[in-house]
DNA sequence: CAGTATCCAACAGGATACTG
DNA sequence: CAGTATCCTGTTGGATACTG
């Protein structure tokens, strides 16, 4: 059974369990920065190689792509798979947790579209 | 009628409408930084005054609180209400859009708790 | 009470060149 | 192909003091 936790179940941020604050920050941390969203977005549609990601994400440098992939791997969003070919073949794939981020992205998308409609009258 | 948009309805990030990417970034922008989440979290539980927020959010300086509140106001998350008393009385309240962010926070919370359970075996 | 002003450190990220 | 290395700039945020 999965219990859905809601912020508004509490009376104040102070009465909100500490691990809730940590969980919220975890989520924010895997999304923030200039490149994580594009990378995750790209990987949501399937396994990709390093150079493929670089082509997929306009303007990203190998330095930043490498750095962000390492961080995402460390945080359990991405699996890095190395195949012993010549030249070496490396593939990146989302983990189960990584794939489930699409739920968060969907709610962010929903909110963002609504907010644009509300504040800018865009339909 | 509200149509729910989903990232996974597309075949690739490139085929994802441009305004979807913008909406996603809008949402990320109102959440990122060290202080926006604590501020929004605090205001979710009701109208607050400047000094009240400062007491509610450990370690925030007036400089940062002022700066972040201005940004949140500019982005339509927060209403600033000035009452002509002596000394002047200022109250901060979430807008409708600001309140609706709780849906996003809930999905972030849900994902974060699941991810912690999955990667660290915390129940 | 509700902020500003000034100065400073740390870090994110870009440019460019190079490597096994 | 899949990255590293080096150098450099701009932004974020902290410390501290001050104001109507």
Image (cartoon, coloured by chain):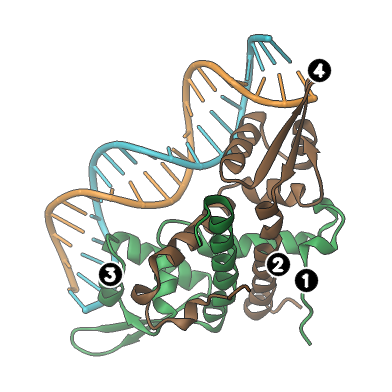
Chain colours: A green, B brown, C orange, D cyan
Residue beneath disc 2: B106
Real-space CA distance between mark 1 and mark 3, rounded to the nearest whole angstrom: 37 Å
**Mark 4 in CB contact with mark 2 (< 8 angstroms):** no
Q: Is residue A112 left or right of residue A72?
A: right
In the rendered image, which quarter is residue A55 located in? Answer: bottom left
Q: Nearer the viewer, mark 1 or mark 4?
A: 4
Q: Secondary structure at mark 3?
A: helix
Point 53% across, 54% down: residue: A121
On the same chain: label 4 and label 3? no
Q: Quadrant of residue C3?
A: top right
Chain holding disc 1: A
Measure how far apart labels 3 and 2 are at the Cα level: 33 Å
Which residue is labeled 3 in the image? Answer: A54
Q: Position of residue B30 (x, y in %)?
A: 57, 51
**Which residue matches tag 4?**
B87
Q: Nearer the viewer, residue A80 or C19?
A: A80
Q: Marks 4/3: CA distance?
A: 57 Å
Q: Is C12 above or below relative to B61?
A: below
Image quarter of the C terminus of chain B: bottom right
Residue position for label 1? A5
Q: Chain of mark 4?
A: B
């Amino acid at each position: 059974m999965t219990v859905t936790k809601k912020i508004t179940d509490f009376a104040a941020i102070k009465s909100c369990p500490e691990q809730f604050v940590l969980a919220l920050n975890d989520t924010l941390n895997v999304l923030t920065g200039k490149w994580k969203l594009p990378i995750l977005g790209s990987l949501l549609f399937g396994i990709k190689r390093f150079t493929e990601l670089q082509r997929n994400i306009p303007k990203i440098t190998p330095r930043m792509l490498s750095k962000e992939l390492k961080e995402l791997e460390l945080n359990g969003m991405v699996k890095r798979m190395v195949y012993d070919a010549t030249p070496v073949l490396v593939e990146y794939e989302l983990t189960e947790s990584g794939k489930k981020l699409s739920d968060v992205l969907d709610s962010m998308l929903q909110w963002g579209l609504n907010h644009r409609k509300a504040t800018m009258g865009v339909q």
